[in-house]
Amino acid sequence: MIRLIAIFLLVASAAFAVQPDEVLDDPVLEKRARDLSQGLRCPVCRNESIDESNAELSRELRILLRERLVDGDSDEQAVDFLVARYGEFVLLRPDTSGVNVVLWYAAPVMLLIALGIGWSVIRRPAVAPPELSDAEKAELQKILRS
């Protein structure tokens, strides 16, 4: 029973982030605002959308987003406005073009390079150490006897 209550509270906490005074009267606009805010990152809370965050800055971003939608902005215009103001960091899924391509593909490329190096090291034949000379063998026997 306690687990059920804990799960309910965790799931419901995201629903309580949007305050009643933020909700728009028009259900279509509110649905658009909720859909857009789920794709925008809270600058305070790492990897949490502004729709889920209780931070004051997230509240301001939600209000600003709704104001832009009420003023007649399209979804793209409203998001572009926030990106122009706060940078691409506010996007939970940044654009995959331009310079960001390097960021998106650097990790997989580095993984493939590391796997290739690891494979070549594993597949390299073992090299036997060189034989000891007679002088080295005698020195070793001398050390072992003492």
Image (cartoon, grey):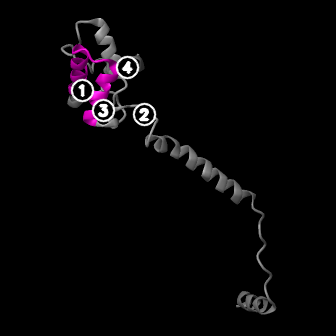
**Residue shown at 33%/14% (left/top)?**
32
Q: CA distance from mark 2 to mark 1?
A: 20 Å
Closer to us: mark 1 or mark 4?
A: 1
Residues marked 4 and 3 touching at CB (< 8 Å)? no
Closer to us: mark 1 or mark 3?
A: 3
**Residue shown at 81%/91% (left/top)?**
134
Q: Which residues are magenta?
A: 60-86
Under circle 2, the secondary element is loop
Q: CA distance from mark 3 to mark 2?
A: 11 Å
User: Quick one: label 1, few (<14), some, or many (20+) residues within 10 Å?
Assistant: many
Q: CA distance from mark 1 to mark 3?
A: 11 Å
Q: Where residue 146 is drawn, which disc sits there?
A: none
Three-letter code, disc 1: Leu
For mark 4, what is the residue? 11
- 121 vs 3, left or right, is right
For mark 3, what is the residue? 83
Under circle 3, the secondary element is helix
Closer to us: mark 2 or mark 1?
A: 2
Three-letter code, disc 4: Val
**Residue shown at 37%/17% (left/top)?**
8
Query: Residue 54 at x, y = what percent?
Result: 25, 26
For mark 1, what is the residue? 61
- 41 vs 103, left or right, is left
User: Quick one: label 2, few (<14), some, or many (20+) residues within 10 Å?
Assistant: few
Which residue is more in the foreground, 126 or 36?
36
Three-letter code, disc 3: Val
Please indicate, yes or no, whether residue 12 appears anywhere in the rendered image.
no
Please say whether residue 74 is one of the residues in the magenta stretch.
yes
Label 4 vs 3, first from the N-terminus: 4
Magenta highlight: main SS: helix
